[in-house]
Image (cartoon, rainbow, N blue to C red):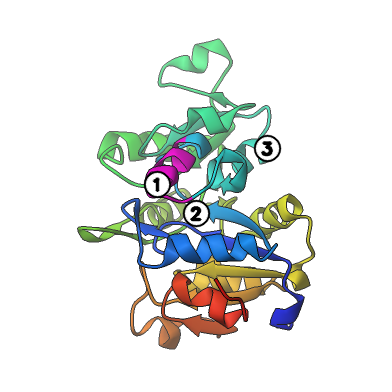
């Protein structure tokens, strides 16, 4: 863990840290403003797969956060760069095509226009994950397609409580098809490196704030980034007992981050 005095850039998860169901958590707007006013670089990093970067920025602006699309790194955008040129069948809830520039999305029946997909790309779960869609993905995996996933989250937090996410389906596809998924969003090292490049800082000069101890905090710490876990969003009281490691810092909410860094509003 680097000294907090060395921090030059902050990576911030969105869902469960800044907002829940796109409504600002108490003190989050002010805390983000304080970080920026202090001269720290900030990039918002998210595994959200239901919205594009532009849509995320618009939703955050409505919640009174002063951000734009350039401040945001999404798993779909990072994945598109990683899979440039590939033919992909997408299993996802939400329209993210704008952030998938550079790859070809294959609809059912398109095999006659270029062959079967190279990749089964799995995003966030929702009503689209019915038997027909999941079984179609399974059939492509059996025919040799790679399984690439934006994240492995088992749950996500909404104002209606915890909801089942894609991780449960991914585990089933891996077991049934005898394959292993490649993760391109958090907690992959490639995703965190992309965020560091966006900030122009080294891992030892960065801090990651998240509500998911494994994907957000420990994933970042494995790369040498200081990790801060917040007790909001999907955080559960037994999360630390079940975790595969220990966060560098634990705070009640993102509103406490300026004080942790010794900043004043």
Query: Which structural element holds mark 1?
Result: loop
- Residue at 47 percent across and 81 percent down: it is 251
Residue toward you, 244 or 229: 229
Which region is colored magenta? 55-65
Q: Is residue 247 visible?
A: no
Query: Which structural element holds mark 2?
Result: loop
Q: Residue furthest top?
A: 113
Residue toward you, 46 or 68: 68
Image vertical order of residue 39 relative to residue 238, above or below: above
First in sequence, mark 1 or 2: give its number.
Answer: 1
- Residue at 64 percent across and 29 percent down: it is 86
Reading the image, the residue beneath label 2 is: 151
Q: On the picture, is 69 further left or further right than 168? A: right
Disc 1 and disc 2 in contact, CB within 8 angstroms: yes
Residue 88 in the image, given as x and y percentages of width and height = 54, 30
- Residue at 37 percent across and 74 percent down: it is 235
Q: Which mark is residue 124?
A: 1
Q: Quadrant of the C terminus?
A: bottom right
Q: Which mark is residue 106?
A: none
Find the distance from the CA under tag 3 to the CA under tag 1: 19 Å
């Amino acid at each position: 863990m680097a000294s907090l005095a060395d921090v030059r850039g902050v990576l911030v998860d969105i869902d469960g840290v800044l907002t829940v169901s796109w409504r600002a958590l108490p003190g989050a707007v002010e805390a983000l403003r304080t970080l920026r006013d202090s001269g720290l670089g900030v990039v918002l990093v998210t595994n959200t797969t239901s919205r594009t970067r532009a849509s995320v920025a618009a939703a955050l602006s409505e919640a009174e956060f002063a951000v734009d699309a350039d401040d945001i790194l999404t798993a779909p955008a990072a994945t598109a760069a990683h899979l440039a040129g590939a033919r992909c069948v997408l299993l996802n809830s939400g329209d993210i095509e704008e952030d998938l520039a550079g790859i070809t999305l294959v609809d059912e029946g398109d095999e006659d226009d270029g062959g079967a997909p190279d990749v089964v790309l799995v995003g966030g779960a929702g009503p689209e994950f019915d038997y027909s869609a999941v079984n179609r993905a399974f059939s492509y995996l059996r025919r040799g397609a790679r399984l690439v996933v934006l994240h492995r989250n088992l749950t996500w937090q909404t104002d209606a409580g915890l909801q089942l996410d894609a991780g449960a389906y991914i585990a089933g596809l891996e077991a049934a098809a005898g394959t292993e998924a490649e993760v391109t969003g958090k907690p992959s090292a490639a995703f965190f490196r992309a965020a560091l490049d966006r900030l122009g800082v080294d891992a030892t000069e960065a801090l990651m704030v998240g509500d998911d101890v494994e994907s957000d905090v420990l994933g970042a710490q494995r790369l040498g980034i200081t990790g801060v876990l917040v007790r909001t969003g999907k955080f559960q009281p037994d999360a630390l007992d079940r975790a595969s490691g220990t966060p560098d810092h634990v705070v009640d909410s993102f509103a406490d981050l300026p004080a942790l860094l010794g900043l004043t509003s």
